[in-house]
Image: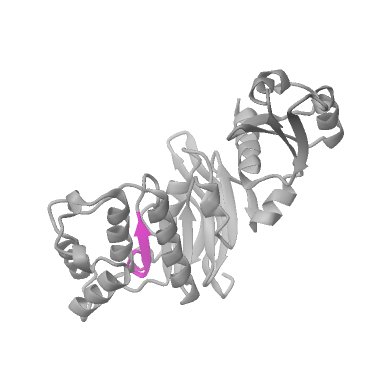
């Protein structure tokens, strides 16, 4: 395997009966980077993450996490990485501190008390450390889960939709902490449905129906899509959505607030489809750089269409 990579996997495949959940994917994540893992529900993100952290055996493929072999060293990988599950998985009848003490015993940590104190302080949990986990809001549960992931000082974090269901400030605070950790050398692979979070990553990987269909820096993924987007705003913009859908050159129409994003890969056909509506009083039509969300929608519609 290539040196200098925190994750280096090739041909990773997982089947559940006749269903292929992950289909021969390759991922190579350098140390110290933050990568976003995107895709619709059921696309294979969680299955991939569970294979990477040693919880699931791959049916085919090979690779390493932190230089440890997925096939022969899954137990060592479990101890070396920090894995944050989609669902809160700590004991609600224990306090924050008691949960962390249990985790520390599981990892047989030396100097556990000091490490717990440091982690609690770092994540702003000092005043709440005696509070029962079941009484915490989504944002504070998230901090507890991150604290438990960090307690054994992993060099790789695998985070499965860690900010689902938390408020915008908690999401922002969480990402600020992720980037502070990254600046200290930690590597992070995080799955998310939030486009603003994906844009905070060094690189993104888009997976659908078990296949990687796009990867790269956000600007690269947008450029690779070959997508053109026009923004329709003003009086009557919403009413145009159904009229525009299905016209030649228009691949999808999406609402963004009070505006419409009209997108496709044939710029001339898009212009022709929108032409009859230019010059209408109170209506403006302008070309814009496609957003990551535009590209996300395009990829999702393409892969769903190809599976039908």
**In the image, 29: left or right of 81?**
right
Residue 140 at least partly seen: yes
What predominant SS class does the magenta segment belong to? helix
First to last magenta residue range:
75-84
Residue at x-position 59% and y-position 31%: 304
- Residue 204: image location, x then y, percent: 58, 55
Residue at x-position 48% and y-position 67%: 179
**In the image, 151: left or right of 133?**
right
The colour scheme used to paint the residues is: one colour
Q: From the viewer's perspective, is residue 266 above or below residue 109?
A: above
Residue 242 sits in which quadrant?
top right
Residue found farthest to the top: 243
Frontmost residue, 219 versus 212: 219
Residue at x-position 70% and y-position 44%: 290
Residue found farthest to the front: 281
Residue 160 at least partly seen: no
Frontmost residue, 89 versus 210: 89
Q: From the viewer's perspective, is residue 152 above or below residue 239?
A: below
- Residue 154: image location, x then y, percent: 37, 71
Frontmost residue, 88 versus 170: 170
Indicate the quadrant containing the C terminus: top left, top right, bottom left or bottom right: top right
Residue at x-position 81% and y-position 31%: 270
- Residue 264: image location, x then y, percent: 75, 34
Indicate the quadrant containing the N terminus: top left, top right, bottom left or bottom right: bottom right
Was residue 135 drawn as part of the magenta stretch in this picture?
no
């Amino acid at each position: 395997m290539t040196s200098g990579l925190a994750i280096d996997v090739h041909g990773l495949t997982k089947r559940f009966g006749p269903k292929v959940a992950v289909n021969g994917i390759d991922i190579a994540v350098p140390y110290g980077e933050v990568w976003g893992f995107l895709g619709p529900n059921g696309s294979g993100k969680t299955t991939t993450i569970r294979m990477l952290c040693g919880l699931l055996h791959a049916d085919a493929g090979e690779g390493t996490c932190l230089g440890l072999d997925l096939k022969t060293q899954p137990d060592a990988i479990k101890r070396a990485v920090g894995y944050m599950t989609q669902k809160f998985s700590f004991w609600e009848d224990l306090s924050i501190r008691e949960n962390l003490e249990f985790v520390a015993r599981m990892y047989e940590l030396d100097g556990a008390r000091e490490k717990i104190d440091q982690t609690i302080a770092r994540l702003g949990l000092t005043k709440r450390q005696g509070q029962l986990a079941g009484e915490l809001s989504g944002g504070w549960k998230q901090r507890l889960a991150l604290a438990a992931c960090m307690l054994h000082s992993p060099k790789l974090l695998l985070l499965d939709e860690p900010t689902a269901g938390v408020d915008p400030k908690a999401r922002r605070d969480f990402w600020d902490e992720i980037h502070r950790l990254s600046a200290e050398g930690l590597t992070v692979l995080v799955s998310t449905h939030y486009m603003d979070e994906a844009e905070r990553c060094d690189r993104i990987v888009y997976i659908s129906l078990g296949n990687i269909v796009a990867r790269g820096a956000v600007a690269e993924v947008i450029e690779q899509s070959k997508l053109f987007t026009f923004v329709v705003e003003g009086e009557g913009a919403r009413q145009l959505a159904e009229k525009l859908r299905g016209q030649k050159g228009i691949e999808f129409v999406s609402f963004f607030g009070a505006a419409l994003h009209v997108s496709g890969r044939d710029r001339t056909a898009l212009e022709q489809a929108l032409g009859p509506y230019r010059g209408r009083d109170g209506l403006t039509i302008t070309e814009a750089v496609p957003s990551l969300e535009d590209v996300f929608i395009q990829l999702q519609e393409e892969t769903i269409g190809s599976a039908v």
